[in-house]
Image (cartoon, rainbow, N blue to C red):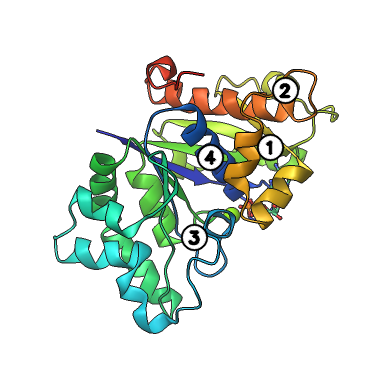
Amino acid sequence: MGNVIAFWSPCHGQTGSSSNMVATAAVMAMDYVSHTLAAHTHYGISMVENAFLRSWRGGSGSASYSAQGIDSLETLARSKQLSSSMIKDYAVPVFSGSLDVLAGTQKPEEDLFLKMHEVTDSICQSARSAYDLTMIDVTSGTRNVLTNAVLESADMVVVSLNQNMALLREFFDHPPAVLEGKTFIIVLGQYDAGSRLTLTNIRRLFKTRIPMFAVPHNSGYMDACNEQKVVEFFLKRKHIQAAQPDYAFMQEIRRLTRGIYQSLAIDPNMYEKEA
Ligand SMILES: Nc1ncnc2c1ncn2[C@@H]1O[C@H](COP(=O)(O)OP(=O)(O)O)[C@@H](O)[C@H]1O
Ligand SMILES: [Mg+2]
């Protein structure tokens, strides 16, 4: 049985939550034999889709929304016809045998889409039997019913924060109720190793034992996301050497992928691809 991982941030637009998931999904697919599904619950523009699905939608209008992506899963789940093998039919393979991406909603109104919270749990359950890992990029904060339903159903949450002291203080002083009793790890997005707020200092300052990782700010990675070249970006850096510029970036993301397995109590070595 696979696991569902929600990528979430308490705060909108500054922690790189979606970009952190895109990088994690791509490196997971490159380094491990596990089969991953990357999905998202954004209404409108989505980083996950933009990064992986090169003009996949082909300009199709909302009229056919029920025929593809996440909307199809909802329809099937509502009629109790969603089997694990069917999920794969509605996802787009972007990294052969390792990573599929599920297109987001095409519904004409956001309220219609939010109703999906009623069947989120059964979709997650089918995803667990179809994929080893299902990563879902949800909208930030706790005011969205669909976000809350995914957080509730997920086996673990990757919480994105950053090196903004006010944000860190708020998070550690008032831990969000949605994380209560949940397995979660913290990722600092857009990480700047030159800041005084390093991973080590943040751990020390807030006396926390929650596993903490970083996705460093990287211009090449940003361009790759914008140009739908994420898979190529990582494949080019698969055998990166310590002297090369993006070495630290790759090291951090690889530490994060291992950390996700460990938080799920899975030995990453069991799934690692031969070099
Ligand atoms: N590690 C990173 N390196 C470079 N640019 C990044 C990084 N993380 C995010 N960005 C950029 O920041 C912007 C917001 O990122 P996004 O992942 O959509 O944030 P969020 O999901 O938290 O709203 C995007 O333009 C993205 O390309
Ligand atoms: Mg986002």
Identify the residue under disc 4: 26
Instruction: Kindly indicate whether the residue at mark 1 contacts the one at mark 2 (C-beta within 8 angstroms).
Output: yes
Q: Quadrant of residue 242?
A: top right
Residue 83 lies, in percent from the top left, at 17, 52
Q: How many residues crowd mark 3 within 10 Å: few (<14), some (14–19), many (20+)?
A: few
Q: Earlier in the sequence, mark 1 or mark 3?
A: 3
Q: Which structural element holds mark 3?
A: loop
CB-based contact (under 8 Å), mark 1 and mark 3: no
Could you say whether the residue bearing mark 4 is in a helix, strand or loop? helix
The quadrant holding residue 198 is: top right
Give me the C-alpha separation between circle 1 and circle 3. Answer: 20 Å
Tell me the distance, in whole angstroms, between the alpha carbons under discs 2 and 3: 29 Å
Q: Quadrant of the N terminus?
A: top left
Query: In this figure, which residue is indicated by the disc labeled 3?
Result: 143
Q: Quadrant of ligand 2?
A: bottom right
In the depicted structure, whether residue 181 falls above or below residue 134: above
Residue 168, numbered circle = 1
Some atom of ligand 1 lies within 8 Å of the CB belonging to the residue at label 4: no
User: Which circle marks residue 205 in the picture?
Assistant: 2
What is the three-letter code of the residue carrying label 4? Ala
Amino acid at the residue labelled 3: Arg
Q: Residue furthest left?
A: 80
The residue that appears at 24% across and 68% down in the rendered structure is 75
Does the numbered disc 3 mark a residue whose Cβ is under 8 Å from ligand 2? no
Give the mark, 4 or 2, whose residue is nearer the N terminus. Answer: 4
**Residue in the foreground of this view, choosing between 96 and 128:** 96
Dot 4 alpha-carbon crowd within 10 angstroms: few under 14, some 14 to 19, many 20 or more:
many
Q: Position of residue 60 (x, y in %)?
A: 45, 79
Q: From the top left corner, tell me how far across and down residue 51 is, in percent.
A: 59, 54
**Of marks 2 and 1, which one's residue comes earlier in the chain?**
1
Q: Label 2 amino acid?
A: Leu
In the structure shown, which secondary structural element does the residue marked by tag 2 occupy? helix
